[in-house]
Image (spheres, coloured by chain):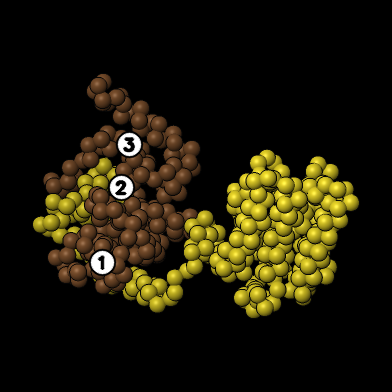
Chain colours: A brown, B yellow
Amino acid sequence: MRVLLDDRATDASLVAAVAGGDADALAVLFRRHAPWITARLTRRCADAELVDLALHDTFISVWRSAAGYRGTGEVGAWLWSIAIRRLIDQLRRRRPVPVEHVPEQPLPPPAPGIELHDLLGRLPADLQATVEAVHLDQLTTAEAALLLGIPQGTVKSRLHRARALLARQLPGDLR
Amino acid sequence: MTDLDHYFHPATPPALARPIEDRWTDPSIVRTAGTPGAMPAHGITAERLDAVLATVLDTVQVEQVAPRRPRIERLLVALRVPEPTARLLASTTGFRWAWIAAVTLVLVFAAAANGADQRPDQLAVFLALAPVVPVLGVLAAFSGPLDRTREVATAAPLSGLCLALLRTVGVVATAIGMDLLAVLASPTRGWMRLAWMLPSLALTSATLALGARVGLRRAAWAAIVAWLALVTMLGATLDDALAPYRAVGQSVAAAVAAAGIVMVLLWRRRFEWNWSAA
C-alpha cells in the first residue's frame, strides 16, 4: 500500500515507508522533525558543524534501521534517542569548537507558559544537566562525560549528590 | 523574551528547558499545533536544514544503487572492525561461502568416518587433515589465481606483514571454526579430538615464517607436505597412528609455533618483498 506522503501522514506510517526503502518518506520525516532535533542538539553542543553532522548521521541511521523500529513509543522519542547518540559519536571524534564564554546574566522570569520541570528544578544547574543526560536522555556515564565535557568521576559524584539532594526533599515513602 | 530565547540561553537550566522540549514532541500538542519549524532567529534556518537533508538524500541514493555489503563484511563491521579492514578481510578467499562449505564438508566426513568402532587410525586421518585447513586457507588467500583481491591487496597502503597477518588471522579463525564444527560431527569423545589445535598453530606460523624467506605459496606447500609425511611416517614406525598427537608431539608443536612466531617478527621486513612473490 502506498502511503500518502504529505503532512498528514503519521510518523509511524512514514517510518514504515522508510523501512520499505522510500526516500521521499525520509524527506518528509526530516522536514517534520529536523528543526526540533537541531534545536535540542544545539542546546547540548554549541558547535553548529558538529550538530549538522549529528543530524545527518541521525537520519542515515533512521534510513538504515527503520525496519528495526518496533512501533512502541513515540517516533519522536525514538528519533531523539538516535540523535543524542550520534552527537556523542561526533564528540568522540572531535571536540567541539569552544564558544566564547557567555557571562551568566540574570534571566528575566520565564513566560507564564513555561513550568519548571518539577524534580529537576530542585537541583543546582550543573546537577540538573548531569541528571538530564543520564536519566532523561539515558546516556551511560562515559557518554554523559563526553557530552558535558567533564571527567566520568565527576559525572558519578554529581549523580550521587543529586540523588542525595532529591532524597532529602522527597517525602519518606518515595525515597 | 520568548520561550525560544529562554530555551537557547546558555544560562537556562535544564529544568526550564526540558518542558519546552517536551512540548515539541508531546503527541497531544503536536497533533493540534504540529512540530516546530525552522528557528531562524537562533541559527536554525531552513537553508541550513535543507543542506543537511540534501546530503542525507545523496547518501541514501548511493546506498539504493550500491550493492549491499556481503554478510560477513557487515558482521565484521558490527564487531567494530574498521570498514576498510572488514572489506579486505571479507574478500579473502577463505571467507567465500563455497570455500567454507566445501572444506567443512570434507572435514565433517573425515571426522564422521571415524565410525562407532572408534578405530584410532581413522581419528588419525582427521587429526592429520585438520591442521592443513588453515594453511590451505592462507595459501588460497595469497595465491594469484584464487585471490580475488590480488590487485587491491598489492596496492593496499599496508605493510606486507600487516596485510599477511591480517588475512591470516581471518583465515585461521574461520578454519579453526570449521575444524571445531567437524569435531562436533565426530563420534569420538575425549581430548584427542582437539589434538589438532597446536599442530594447526605450528603449521600456520611455520608457513608464515617460511613465507618470509621463500614466498607464502611455496612455504604453505612445503609445510603441508612436510606435515603429512611426518605424521604418516611417525604413525607407521611407532605402530601407533595417534603417536604424533600425544604429549611429546604436542610439546614439539608448541615449540614450533613459538619459534615460528619469533621468526615472523624477526623477519618482518622481508614480507615487503616476499609475501606476494609466490
Q: Which amino acid, by three-letter code, is at mark 3? A: Pro
Q: Nearer the viewer, residue A90 or A62?
A: A62
Q: Which mark is residue A124?
A: 3
Task: Say which amino acid is labelled 2.
Answer: Ala
Where does the image place residue B172, in percent across and percent down from the top left? Answer: 66, 58
Specify the farthest residue to the front. B117
Which residue corresponds to mark 2?
B11
- Report helix, strand or loop for mark 2: loop
Extreme residue toward the top, this view: A172
Instruction: Tell me if residue B4 can be seen.
Output: yes
Query: Label 1 belongs to which residue?
Result: A17
State which mark lies toward you, 2 or 3: 3
Q: Tell me the chain of label 3.
A: A
Q: Would you say the residues marked 1 and 2 are in contact, meaning their CB atoms lie under 8 Å apart?
A: no
Disc 2/disc 3 C-alpha distance (Å): 12 Å
Viewer-nearest of discs 1 and 2? 1
Q: Judge whether residue A55 can be spotted in this image.
A: no
Give the x, y percent position of residue A91: 45, 56
Residue B176 at x, y percent in the picture: 65, 54
